[in-house]
Image (cartoon, helix red, strand yellow):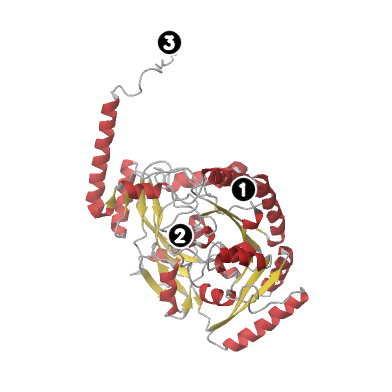
Amino acid sequence: MADTVLAKVDYLKPLEDKPYSQVVTDRQNFSSQQKACLEKLLGAEHVCTDPAALDALSRDKSHEEAGRPCCILKPENLEKLCALVKYANETSLPLTPLSSGTHTYGNALVRMGGAAIDLSGWKHIENIDHRNRSARVQPGVTYGQLQEALAKEQLRALFPLLPRRDQSVLTSNLEAQPKLIPEFNYSEPVYTMEIVMPTGDIFRTGTAALGPPELNKSDMVGPWGPGFDWNRLYTRSQGTLGIVTWMNIMAEPLPSRQKLFFTASESLQVLVDFTYRVQRKWLGYDCFILNRTALALMLAQSMPGDYERLKKRLPAYIQIFCIGGLRRFPDERIAWQEADFLETARECGLAPQPGISQAPRAAAFFEQNLLRCWDGELYWKDRLKGASSDIFFVTTMNRTSRFVEAMHQEAIKVSVPTDDMGIYVQPIENGRACHLEFMLPYDPVDRYDCSRMRNLHGSASRRMYGLGALFTRAYGAWAEMVASGSAVQFQTAKMVKDVLDPKNIMNLGKLGL
């Protein structure tokens, strides 16, 4: 038997036996051929290679490394989208789907090359079903557009807290953004959806699997099947398992009238205990807690003067609570819920008020904006310094004070003012758990401030994770942190990815943990 001969590698010789100029020419030719194929497939007007547009998508508002797509593709219908995905499989072209106008957490960055599929132009509301309280929306539908359509049918959308004007409703629900109504039945608002699988095939979940919407005789609000729970698999998957083209989501009856209460306290724990009691009784609609910084950022009419005045006057924490009266006996519904709410407050030694004496416009602001997007040019989180670095996770409400204390300690270590930190507590499933969010403002054009905030974001995230924070939306560095802490979860996610995306073309480099 002949001895095995080891390969010899000349590290001074290029791997390709071509001059560099020839390599550059070959790559340019390949790019030109690829662009011609995509233009033939989608139409020249739906393939964008403008350097300015590509640069705009290369970064978002996170601290993640830049990732520039080779082109931006805008398929105009389902047929062309399926053909595009099949072409991507044949040529191993990575695809990253996106539909919101503003990207915040790095999940839509094209980090490992390939094309971005922009579905923000798909803005059709396919159907509103008042009987089943549902709306079927395409990826580009925004909350403002949806609420305007639902209001005509006496329905309301399930809103997160003051979303951006260009926030995709479909993406928001796929990413499981918490809703202001903490009722248990709204924790999973997705009924059914249509997905272009990574192979280019069409798949629909739940009762939508019976056939195309125009031929389906069911109401398409049964979320389970075929087989296991596909909706939960695709929630938080960050576009790594396919492209969702429409989603049938829950809606809620639009209150004919509503009543707001503001409960102030210098102690977060006091408001947490109060919120626990209220949620156990299933009272009200919208319910959440803000600290003075977050509230001042929303209410300030000018920056920084009005903001600083408000922040000095406001109490440390305020619970905002809304009772809604529906079409049937609205006054009676508000009356008994108000009585129960105020009785619970008295038991906790608290005195809810219809407004905030230190901020007279608060009542009118929330009356108008609980069902609206933020309409300012600069998003409310970014008003203080131009940008905000957010840390958010799921925990139980009784542990929020411990996390707040730990976050203050981390901020002090890097000399970040703790009184500039916004805090938002959103109960989930009637208080069974909560979404806890920290908003850390910084100046995006100040390199030192960016570096300091990047370090704080990393160290604080690790501290929160060590204290038991559940990062259910594991973006960027959080995904690495979560994956390294659970080998089983990582291997399972990888196995699912390999099965559903055998060519590994969808949002390359991410697993959607």
- Amino acid type at image mark 2: Thr
Please state which of residues 507 and 464 is positioned toward the viewer in this rendering. 464
Crowd class of label 2 (few under 14; some 14 to 19; many from 20; radius 10 Å): many
The furthest residue to the top:
2
Q: Name the residue rendered at 41%, 70% in the picture.
A: 145
Does residue 325 appear in this view? no
Distance between the Cα atoms at labels 3 and 2?
Answer: 60 Å
Checking the image for residue 2, the label placed there is 3
Residue holding disc 2: 171
Of the two numbered discs 3 and 1 on the same chain, state the one appearing first in sequence. Answer: 3
> From the viewer's perspective, is residue 288 above or below residue 68?
below
Please state which of residues 30 and 317 is positioned toward the viewer in this rendering. 317
Q: Position of residue 315 (x, y in %)?
A: 68, 67
- Amino acid type at image mark 3: Ala
Q: Position of residue 373 (x, y in %)?
A: 47, 68
Distance between the Cα atoms at labels 1 and 2?
Answer: 24 Å
Checking the image for residue 461, the label placed there is 1
Q: Name the residue rendered at 40%, 58% in the picture.
A: 99
Does residue 182 appear in this view? yes
> Of helix, strand and loop, which one carries label 3?
loop
Distance between the Cα atoms at labels 3 and 1?
Answer: 56 Å
Checking the image for residue 114, the label placed there is none
Residue depth check, mark 3 versus mark 1: number of the one nearer the observer: 1
> From the viewer's perspective, is residue 488 above or below residue 356?
above
Q: Looking at the rendering, in which quadrant would you find the N terminus?
A: top left
Q: Position of residue 260 (x, y in %)?
A: 61, 78
